[in-house]
Image (cartoon, rainbow, N blue to C red):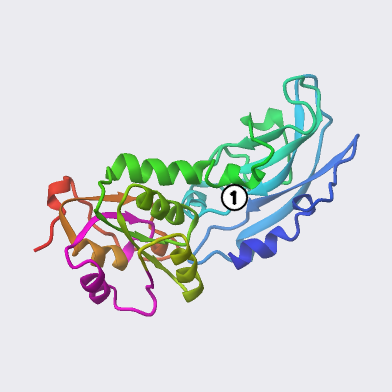
Amino acid sequence: MKLVFSLFRTFPSLSRRSIYHRTMVKAKRFIKAAQFDGFPKESDLKLVEEELPEIKDGEFLCEAVYLTVDPYMRVFSETLKIGEVMSGQLVGKVVESKNADYPVGTNVTTEELGGLGWRSHLLSSEGVVTKLDHPPEIPLSQAMGVLGMVGMTAYFGFVDICQPKEGETVVVNGAAGAVGSLVGQIAKIKGCRVIGFAGSDDKVEYVKSLGFDEAFNYKTIDLDETLKKVAPNGVDIYFDNVGGKFSVTVRNHMNRLSRISQCGSISQYNAKEPLMVPSFDRYDECQRD
């Protein structure tokens, strides 16, 4: 994250100051400069500048307001060729238009994996750009949060896949993250008992403030012993954002007919030799000894 934030400081378009000019736009984009090897390095990405042509009839020009920084991008970056724009979603505003359906000031977004990626400006002719019907009282950033991919991942990944029932015990790791924090809140609305795990004491306090019944810093506790104490009757639902050894331990505490939503495996994304956790073919194979 420190890498990304340091790189984003070079984007003048992410501040209130616009670099748009009527006859010429100097656009910036991050391209993949080298194949990631372990944890991403600043040299793996390169900031390049390009001059965009004037828009044609039916086109419009967008300026970035927000860009995503999501774990999935580390995985999908493996499929990018050297020189291609770093993948990621963009939320922006139309700053020039020759399209009556997209007047200046319109809020727009791009697809997460649509290839438009990290850039300061883009032309509508470069890919799929969708108008945001966004209530003005709600922060535009929520189009990337609870009202966007993050919210849909949390809702459908938990409610549809896990089919929660009132009184069940739910374990969420990455509980302070964008998806995990929403999953815990949805689980509480559904009447579940929710146990969250995060990677720092500050994150644990944040998780507790969201209403989780229990929250722990996984770096300072014995996970197996903790689950024995706080989930003595086993775990009914496991929403997994982390994978690796953490998941191996939690699965030893799963009840018969329990459910697992495998949302991510962030602990393994930068590993040179990832730990593969076997999956279950049927729910009734998830059971404790």
Which residue is most to the bottom? 220
Q: Point out the stretch of residues depicted in magenta.
A: 215-244
Task: Name the quadrant of the C terminus.
Answer: bottom left
- Mark 1, residues whose alpha carbon is within 10 Å: few (<14), some, or many (≥20)? some
Indicate the quadrant where residue 136 lies: top right
| Residue at figure coordinates x 33%, y 47% from the top left | 190
Q: Is residue 202 above or below residue 117?
A: below
Residue 194 x %, y %: 33, 59
Q: Is residue 176 magenta?
A: no
- The location of residue 108, given as percent across then percent down, is 67, 34
Q: Quadrant of residue 199?
A: bottom left
Q: Position of residue 221 (x, y in %)?
A: 33, 78
Vertical placement of residue 152 versus 5, above or below = above
Asked whether 174 or 127 is in front, the reply is 174
Q: Tell me the amino acid under the disc marked 1.
A: Thr
- Under circle 1, the secondary element is loop
Q: Quadrant of residue 93?
A: top right
Residue 275 in the image: state x and y as whole percent: 31, 64
As displayed, is residue 125 above or below residue 163?
above
Say whether residue 140 is left or right of residue 18: left
Q: Residue at x 73, y 25 (%)?
A: 102
Q: Residue furthest left?
A: 289
Q: Which residue in the protein does label 1 denote?
A: 68
Specify whether 146 is left or right of 185: right
Q: Is residue 118 visible?
A: no
In-image side of 3 versus 93 (left or right)? left
